[in-house]
Image (spheres, helix red, strand yellow):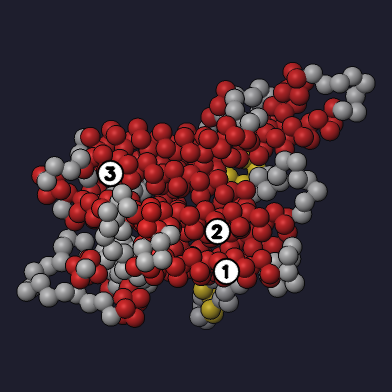
């Protein structure tokens, strides 16, 4: 599971070389192999392409879990490797969902409006179509005009561009203002949380242009594919989620294994020293913040068509806190740890909150896991923080025989939860 250091200029050429990056980093090959096996198994067991061993809803659950794993990867880069505890990355996740949701809802509504108007004596005009679409989408908030914010909703390529540009631009502006002011530590975490809360409160308003508390719904219905069942659509989105997770893992593992990864870990461990050595610390931090925000936006754009609905509650600060908890439980400073943590907590949460976990009668009181699951998650986070800072990913250290180097009594560094033992050995 070790990630070695190499020149970033030669890294791309060595990724596919038999004796290059992948051979020296077997964890990447094992991850890609495991993901490929999972994808094949889900496909063969799905109702669409197999014997129906698993339900369509479970295929969607697995697809959404892969999207959350992608967001956890981004969080691990920004927190586990760079030391920036962002409590706002799920806001970028939700913004990506809103951007693709605009096109899905607009195009699908336009299809319905055209079907209803085509039976009229005269062909519908563009104004009649726009008015019908506006009434269908915004009638729930007492409006009929399409807001300016929906100006590109008719175009899939433009909305896909916004999936990248909107989270990236917000992260660029926020990060530039925060990092140039050298805001760090808990103060930066509070600022990211405040940004998320402000954005969430704004979207709750009916005049925000995104239907307020109602959010965007019906996202599981793809325009032009009304005759395709959800059995097939769920598998297609699962494939897309798996492919994006694989590409992101391959790219990010190459980044953290090169020179840039060494600089990021140095910033995490001793930012002042890195700045003293002449590295543009703010530039590195801004780059990582923007790239991870874009990855979260892409993850959200894949997640919400599988969920079918998005509303401002998805931007609540608690969602970003959950993301940090997943990474901590899985083991921050390890890409595979972030994926393990997100998948483990997400699937366990679905099991507990879906009513499948048996209640525990205690005589005068019965523990219902639907109500107590969040308490269990919070206790798990506290336990990991206190007694297992390496998280679940630390188990792999034992299999690899990794141990703390002999530093003659000197500490490894200020961040006990990161993979500093392995880094020091190398």
Taking the image as shown, residue 200 lies to the left or right of residue 140, namely: left
Look at the numbered disc 2 and give the secondary structure of its residue.
helix
User: 414 above or below 27?
Assistant: above
Q: Is residue 316 visible?
A: no
Circle number at residue 379: none
- Looking at the image, tell me whether mark 2 or mark 1 is earlier in sequence order: 1
Q: Residues within 10 Å of mark 2 (few under 14, many from 20)?
A: many
On screen, 390 above or below 327? below
Q: Residue at x 66, y 59 (%)?
A: 235
Mark 1 residue element: helix
Query: Residue sitting at 57 percent across and 49 percent down?
Result: 302
- Mark 3 sits on what residue? 285
Q: Position of residue 2 (x, y in %)?
A: 31, 68
Picture layout, residue 286 above or below residue 124: below
Image point (31%, 61%), residue name: 333
The foreground one among 246 and 181 is: 246
Are discs 3 and 2 less than 8 Å apart at CB?
A: no
Q: Which mark is residue 242?
A: 2
- Name the element at disc 3: helix
Q: In this figure, which residue is indicated by the disc labeled 1? A: 38
- Whole-angstrom CA distance, mark 3 to mark 2, is 28 Å
Q: Is residue 7 left or right of residue 121?
A: left
* First in sequence: mark 3 vs mark 1: 1
Q: Are marks 2 and 1 in contact (CB under 8 Å)?
A: yes
Left or right of 27 on screen, residue 419: left
Q: Between marks 3 and 1, how big is the CA–CA gap?
A: 34 Å
């Amino acid at each position: 599971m070790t990630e070695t250091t190499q020149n970033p200029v030669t890294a791309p050429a060595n990724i596919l070389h038999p004796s290059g990056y992948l051979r020296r980093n077997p964890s990447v090959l094992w991850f890609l192999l495991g993901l490929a096996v999972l994808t094949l198994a889900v496909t063969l067991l799905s109702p669409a392409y197999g014997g129906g061993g698993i339900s369509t809803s479970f295929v969607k659950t697995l697809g959404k879990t892969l999207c959350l794993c992608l967001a956890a990867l981004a969080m691990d880069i920004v927190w586990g490797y760079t030391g920036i505890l962002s409590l706002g990355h799920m806001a970028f996740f939700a913004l990506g969902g809103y951007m693709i949701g605009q096109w899905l809802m607009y195009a699908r509504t336009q299809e319905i409006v055209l079907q209803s108007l085509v039976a009229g004596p005269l062909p519908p005009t563009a104004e009649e179509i726009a008015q019908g679409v506006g009434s269908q989408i915004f009638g729930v908030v007492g409006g009929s005009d399409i807001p300016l914010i929906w100006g590109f909703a008719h175009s899939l390529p433009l909305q896909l561009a916004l999936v990248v540009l909107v989270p990236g631009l917000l992260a660029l502006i926020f990060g530039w203002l925060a990092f140039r002011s050298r805001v760090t530590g808990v103060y930066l975490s509070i600022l990211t949380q405040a940004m998320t809360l402000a954005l969430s409160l704004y979207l709750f308003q009916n005049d925000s242009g995104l239907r307020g508390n109602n959010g965007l719904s019906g996202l599981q219905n793809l325009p032009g594919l009304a005759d395709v069942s959800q059995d097939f659509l769920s598998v297609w989105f699962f494939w897309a989620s798996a492919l994006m997770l694989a590409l992101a893992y391959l790219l990010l593992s190459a980044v953290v294994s090169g020179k840039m990864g060494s600089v990021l870990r140095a910033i995490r461990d001793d930012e002042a020293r890195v700045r003293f050595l002449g590295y543009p610390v703010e530039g590195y931090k801004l780059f990582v913040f923007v790239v991870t925000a874009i990855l979260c936006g892409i993850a959200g754009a894949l997640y919400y068509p599988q969920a079918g609905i998005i509303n401002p509650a998805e931007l609540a600060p608690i969602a970003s806190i959950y993301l940090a908890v997943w990474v901590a439980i899985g083991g921050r400073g390890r890409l595979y740890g972030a994926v393990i943590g997100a998948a483990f907590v997400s699937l366990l949460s679905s099991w507990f909150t879906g009513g499948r976990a048996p209640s525990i009668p205690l005589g005068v009181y019965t523990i219902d896991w639907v109500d107590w699951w969040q308490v269990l998650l919070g206790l798990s986070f506290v336990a990991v923080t206190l007694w297992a800072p390496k998280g679940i990913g630390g188990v792999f250290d034992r299999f690899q025989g990794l141990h703390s180097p002999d530093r003659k009594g000197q500490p490894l560094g200020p961040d006990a939860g990161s993979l500093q033992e392995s880094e020091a050995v190398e």
